[in-house]
Image: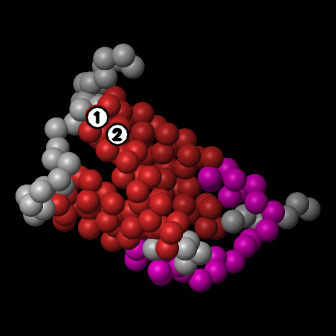
Amino acid sequence: MRDRSFDPTDLAAGVVFTVLGLAFGVSTLGLERGTALRMGPGYAPLVLAAVLTLLGVLIVVAGLRSRGVEGIGPLAWRGMAFLLSAPILFGLTVRGLGFVPAIFLATLLASLASPRLKSWQVLGLAVAITLFSTLVFSYALGLPFRRFGPWLSF
């Protein structure tokens, strides 16, 4: 007789991803999709919903094919707190400080989620992500936002 063990955490996560992907996909059906070269407002959300659905199905299959069940382990409260608060900090400061300082501060905060990073690594990561984001979003894509906001006087 074959052992029918499965991983309930992978199975649950896969079902959640699949349901969310399908729900978001259905919600985009009323939007104009366009083509890959002339994307409409519904193109990218539909593609992302399809990717999420496919990912969910793959995780469900992996969960069902799992031979043993691993324990979940303790929750990483530190990581969750810093990673969830970083985009909130960005959203609260981007209009007043501007894009450059807001992305720098959000990256600093998010990188504190890992206790293994040293302070020079955190600063280097924040500088690199800030430079990359500024070059891509401000200069390459030409998005209309303030690099430095009214809270800064220079």
Q: Are marks 1 and 2 in contact (CB under 8 Å)?
A: yes
Q: Residue at x 64, y 76 (%)?
A: 72
Quarter of the image with the C terminus is bottom left
Please provide percent x and percent y for residue 51: 49, 39
Give SS at disc 1.
helix
Q: Residue at x 55, y 41 (%)?
A: 54
Task: Establish if 137 lies above or below 103.
Answer: above
Quarter of the image with the N terminus is bottom right
Residue type at mark 1: give it: Tyr
Give SS at disc 2.
helix
Please provide percent x and percent y for residue 83: 41, 68
Q: Which mark is residue 139?
A: 1
Q: In the rendered image, which quarter is residue 105 located in?
A: bottom left
Can residue 29 be seen in this snapshot? no
Left or right, residue 6 beside residue 13 = right
* Count of labels in the image: 2
Front residue of 54/98: it is 98
Query: Crowdedness of circle 1 by 10 Å Cα count: few (<14), some, many (20+)?
Result: few
Q: Which mark is residue 135?
A: 2
Q: CA distance from mark 1 to mark 2?
A: 5 Å
Q: In the rendered image, which quarter is residue 30 located in?
A: top left
| Range of residues picked out in magenta | 59-83
Left or right, residue 126 beside residue 2 = left
Please provide percent x and percent y for residue 91: 22, 61
Magenta region includes residue 66? yes
Q: Residue at x 42, y 33 (%)?
A: 47
Q: Residue at x 47, y 80 (%)?
A: 78
